[in-house]
Amino acid sequence: MSNSNEANLTDHFNSDKLFTRKQYYFYIISSLEIFIALIGNTLFLVVMIKYKTALSSNMYVIMSSLSVVDIVGAVALSGHAIRDFLIHDYRTQYNFCRYMAFLISSSSAGNMYHLLLMSIDRYVAVALPLR
């Protein structure tokens, strides 16, 4: 017994058609997003290290590690989608899927914790300025 949905799905994945217009725009937007995230965060790290002489402050350490977490998040979110568009293979192994879910979850949690630490640092600086 052959299921017609399986045949249509297989035909769709094995077709040699080029990108549809919607896929092409998504590919361009995803590529730009990862490029801007990598360049912007890298430039931020370079400027922080080069021009800030007193990097011992807690805020500078938190902001630089937030930049690193953003780079990991951008690569984890967009890298797999771009790979799918380039290779035209939409299958993923189970372990790789779990790894991607881990990267996305840890990046999101890292961003939230960094923003929490930044807000606590600013609160302490304002509420308890001389202690």
Image (cartoon, rainbow, N blue to C red):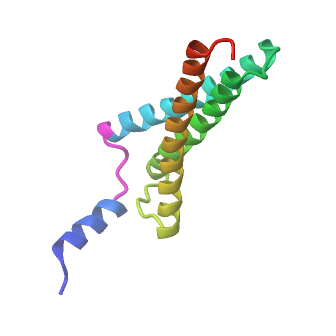
Which residue is pictured at 53% across the width and 46% down the height? 76
Please identify the quarter of the rendering in which residue 49 is found.
Answer: top right
| View extreme (front): residue | 131
Q: Is residue 42 magenta?
A: no
Q: Is residue 14 above or below residue 54?
A: below
Q: Is residue 64 left or right of residue 101?
A: right
Residue 110 is situated, as x and y percent measured from the top left of the image, at 55, 41
Residue 13 is situated, as x and y percent measured from the top left of the image, at 34, 61
Q: Is residue 72 left or right of residue 17?
A: right
Q: Is residue 56 above or below residue 94?
A: above
Q: Is residue 109 left or right of residue 24?
A: right
Query: Magenta stretch mostly in which secondary structure?
Result: loop
Q: Is residue 19 magenta?
A: yes
Which residue is pictured at 49% across the width and 48% down the height? 104
Q: Is residue 78 visible?
A: no
Q: Quadrant of the C terminus?
A: top right
Q: Nearer the viewer, residue 96 or 32?
A: 96
Which residue is pictured at 70% across the width and 25% down the height? 58
Please identify the quarter of the rendering in which residue 71 is found.
Answer: top right
Which residue is pictured at 57% across the width and 31% down the height? 117
Q: How many marks?
A: 0
Residue 19 is situated, as x and y percent measured from the top left of the image, at 36, 44
Span colored in magenta: 15-22
Q: Is residue 124 visible?
A: yes
Residue 86 is situated, as x and y percent measured from the top left of the image, at 49, 48
Please identify the quarter of the rendering in which residue 1 is found.
Answer: bottom left
